[in-house]
Structures are given as structure tokens and as C-alpha cells.
Image: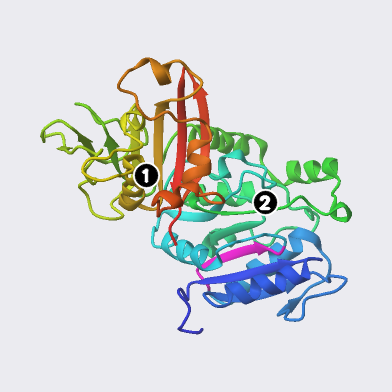
Amino acid sequence: MATNYISNEICVCVTNYDFSDNATKLKNEFSQYLKTVLIDSSSPNPPINVDIFIPNTYYSGLWNASADYAITNNYKYLMFVASDLEIKNVKKLCEYATEAISHKEIGVYSPSVSASSRTSFPILVNGTTSYMRECGVMEGFFFLVKTEILKAIYPISPEFKYGWGIDVLTCHKSYELNFIAVVDDRISIYHPASKTEHAIDIQKANEESNILLDQEVIARHFERINKLQKTFNFINKASTIDLGCGKDIKNPFLATTLHGVDLLDNTPKGIVGADLNIEKIPFPDSTFEYCTAYDFIGYVPRLIYCPNRRFPFIELMNEIYRILKPSGILLSVSPAYPAPEAFQDPTNVNFITKDTFQYYFCEDYLWAKMYGFNGNFKLLAQNMEGGKLTSFLRAVKD
């Protein structure tokens, strides 16, 4: 094996039928970082750089060929990549996958999928967390799995040509072997709608799945998934900072390390004193996975002239971006227009709307750059309820 890869324990199998141009692109990108082979299932116009040709035996054939390659060549992990995927940052994905295998409890890893992606499991959609979280399941179009787990179910019978249920079976075997399945919210991939000519017989696929899976065992596995959907089960020990916290630090993300900033003096609880209208957040760069601001943003002035003209709200957003780690999360809860709560408090001086974060501080717009904003967020979710706007933003850092 080559020694210049970021990991020699992982092999990537790009699997293709009839997405040949993208298959070539994916192979070229992944091969810069990990050992990569391209497996083609007798495409009408196959890619030019195929390593392994197999008959058109549908998903089960591509799965078996990938598993066989990884097992035969003594790799510890297989990264299975369907050739129709859109992946914006392959390098970062490979780095995160390599980080994941350092956690010995992880048996199955996958990036999250974008909200617009075709997916069977909502728990895999990019969420409001800053790291890997246990999810209990994977999608068949992309996964990283221990070959130890593959050996427990390899080979898959060719009769399961559509592949339904193989993803659930893989994860179930992972848990049987005392590993877990995780999804990484730091990075997302996109899985488009299938081509019309690739449409499958849904009834037949369901029948195949029912034969493949022990329904009682799988029902218990889905109970596990449903429980995970409602919790933050992090792989790392996250830290959070609560701005304008008062006497009590709020911890909605269940972080293990807590800090707060307020006008109060320092206390044993880890609350430091600072006036964030005129001072920086007193912590180093890239310190926190999470930053919360409950009923705080509205009290930060937009403009002051003493001693010089400044934009405290813009400066605060710069500071939040600075102290968040890559993919860190900002949670803001603040009164917002058109609710009366945004105006009735005479000390509330920063009137925001549902568009403030999206247009001024988030990718694709970043209008606040003209006022000195130098960060970049992605708006993950937003909801207006009871006169307050709840916003989740992810810090986008290369």
C-alpha cells in the first residue's frame, strides 16, 4: 500500500452504473487522499478509468465487489461511494473519516446529507450539532464501515438486487459486535433523485428487504434509532459558552465544559465578566463547539459613536465566529419583528427579523461584509414562536 495517503487503513470503492463522468471525477478526487478503486457494473458508456468491471448485478453486485476488494486486500475499513453523489469537499470528508476511525467504538460512519437530498432516514439529515453523533443507521449510497462487520454479512445474495435493508442489516451487525453507527454534522453530501430509467419496483424491493431482515430484530434496532433521534449522543466531549448568561449557564447541547460571559463579576461557576458591547469575548480562537445567546442579541447596539463610529452587533458576530471551532454552532434566541416583544422593552435596541442572519451573516449573501464582518455562517434552522426567533447557525471555516 502507498504511504502518502492520509490513512492506509481505508480503501474507497466508487461504485458506478451510468453516472460515468461523475464516477471519474469522484475517483480522481478521492485517490488524492485514500486508496481508491472504481467499480463499474457494465454501464452503457463506462468510465475511462475503471479498475474492476462486473456484470450488471445491481446494488448487491456493487456492494459485494466492494466488500470483496476491501476484505481480500486486508483493509480495516471500506468507504463505499455511489457515483451519483455530489460531494463539495472530498479532502475534508477524508480527513473527518480518518478522524472517525480513531474512535475505536465507531463501526459505521457517514457524513450527513443535505436537507434537499434523497434519503430514507431523517436522522441523517445535517443537524444542529458540531461533531459526530450516534445515529444507529446509514444510507447505502455512502458509508464507511469496519471490514470486521462486512465479514459478518458478506456476501449478499444477488436476489437482493435493489439493496433495500442492507444498510439496516449492516448497522445491526455493527451493534451486535459492540460498535456504534455515527453521522457527522460537520459535512454534508447530496444524493439526487434517481434517474427515471433507474426507477425500481418498490413492492419488489420491500419484499426483498423483508426476506433479508429478521423483522423482530430490526424492529428493536429501529427503536434504538428513534431514541437517538431525540437526544444528543456525542462522540466527543463538547464545550459551550453562553453569552449574557446571568447567574446560570444554559446548556441545551449537553456539553461537558461550560463557560459564561456576563456583566457580572467572575464566579466559581465559570462565568467571566465582560461588556460585549465594547469588549471582545475573553477566550482564544476556536475554543468552543457551541455558543448560545438567549435574550442577548437584542441588547447589542447596531451603531455607537463613542469614541469612534463602531458597529457592535457586527463586531459581536465576528467574535462569535472567532471563538467557535470549525462547524461550531451558534444558537440565538431573541425577540424579533414583527412581534411586540421586539419593541416593548426600552433596552432592546437591536431589532432583527427572520432575514437578518440569513442575508447579513450567512453564505451566499454576507451583506454584513460591507460593515466589517469577516466570518461566514450557514443557517441550519430557524423558527419564530412566542414572539422570539430561534436561529441555529454553523460556523463555516475551511
In front of the other: 310 or 198:
310
**To which quarter of the image does residue 102 belong?**
bottom left
Q: Is residue 134 visible?
A: no
User: What whole-number distance in Å separates the C-alpha atoms at marks 2 and 1?
Assistant: 49 Å
Q: Main secondary structure of the magenta part?
A: strand
| Location of mark 2 (residue) | 166
Q: Residue at x 77, y 53 (%)?
A: 160
Numbered disc 2: secondary structure: helix
Q: Is residue 137 visible?
A: yes
Residue type highlighted by circle 2 = Ile
Q: Residue at x 40, y 18 (%)?
A: 343
Is label 2 or label 1 in front? 1
What are the residue bounds of the magenta stretch? 75-83
In front of the other: 199 or 171:
199
Q: Residue at x 37, y 44 (%)?
A: 314
Image coords of residue 327 (percent x, y): 43, 52
Image coords of residue 172 (percent x, y): 56, 46
* Left or right: residue 304 compared with residue 132: left
* Left or right: residue 329 compared with residue 260: right
Image coords of residue 198 (percent x, y): 85, 55
| Location of mark 1 (residue) | 314
The verdict on residue 309 being magenta is no
- Which sits earlier in the primary sequence, circle 2 or circle 1? 2
In front of the other: 42 or 204:
42
Residue type highlighted by circle 1 = Ile
